Amino acid sequence: MTDDYRVDGRSAKDIAAITLAWRDTLGIAEQWAPSVVGLLEISVPKVIKDFALVVRPDPEMGDAEAYTEFDPPHIAVRGSVYAMARRQDGRSRMTFAHELGHLVMHPGAAKLRSAEALLKATTTIRIFESAEWQARKFASLFLVPDHIAIQFNSAEELAECCKISAQAAQIRFNETAPLRKLKPIPDCVSSTIRALNATTSAD
């Protein structure tokens, strides 16, 4: 759902740790482009009792692409988004990961449903207490954690290999740029390289 609501505050670092823990729990720690459909249909039900992924006809979903509810725990997704996610569409994969973020971070959180309450809440919620901000951050870091993002030399390559949108790939590529810098060569190695190169030059 697009309605935002206040939850316990979490930093981006906190959310990154949560995403890594869930990737590890679901057995996808090193996978570049895990199947989000497979995760929600097979893997998540093995660790969350009574969880189900529910695919609904588009007209039943109204304007929502997907939403998460907790009694019983389930994620409902519109049929067209499900079909696109099965084809590894980047935007649809992000939708699945976003709802997974709500599922694992926000169980029991009270949603604000009236338009008036929602308007008031969205003007007073601090960013780190926003359920929607947290779920967006979770989705981005779950699909492309830092240790995977730094393996790529361009946003285009990242988008293709990790099956995310070009926009999402550019954001993650930029965010991880400082981690991608080459480490300095240790002195013991550089001195050997200089000596060998000097010998080659003398020949």
Image (cartoon, helix red, strand yellow):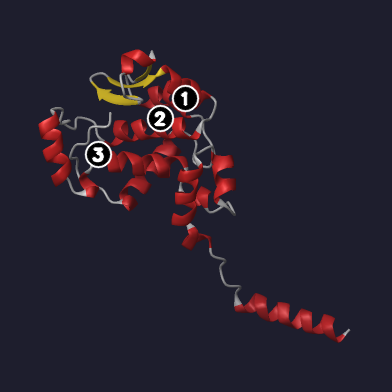
Residue sitting at x 39%, y 31%: 95
Measure the alpha-carbon separation of dots 1 and 3: 22 Å
Q: Is residue 98 above or below residue 177?
A: above
Mark 1 sits on what residue?
37
Residue sitting at x 37%, y 27%: 47
Q: What count of labels does the image hold?
A: 3
Precedes in sequence: disc 1 or disc 3? 1
Residue 107 in percent (x, y) is at 24, 31
Precedes in sequence: disc 2 or disc 1? 1
* Quadrant for the C terminus in the image: bottom right
Q: How would you rate the neighbour count of disc 3 (Cα within 10 Å): few for under 14, some for 14-19, many for 20 or more?
A: many
Precedes in sequence: disc 2 or disc 3? 2
Residue 18 in percent (x, y) is at 35, 43
Mark 3 sits on what residue?
131
Q: How would you rate the neighbour count of disc 1 (Cα within 10 Å): few for under 14, some for 14-19, many for 20 or more?
A: some
Quadrant of the rendered image containing residue 98: top left
* Quadrant for the N terminus in the image: top left
Residue sitting at x 46%, y 50%: 172
Mark 2 residue element: helix
Mark 1 touching mark 3, by CB under 8 A? no
Measure the alpha-carbon separation of dots 2 and 1: 8 Å
Mark 2 sits on what residue?
96
Whether residue 116 sits left or right of residue 173 in the image: it is left
Mark 2 touching mark 1, by CB under 8 A? yes
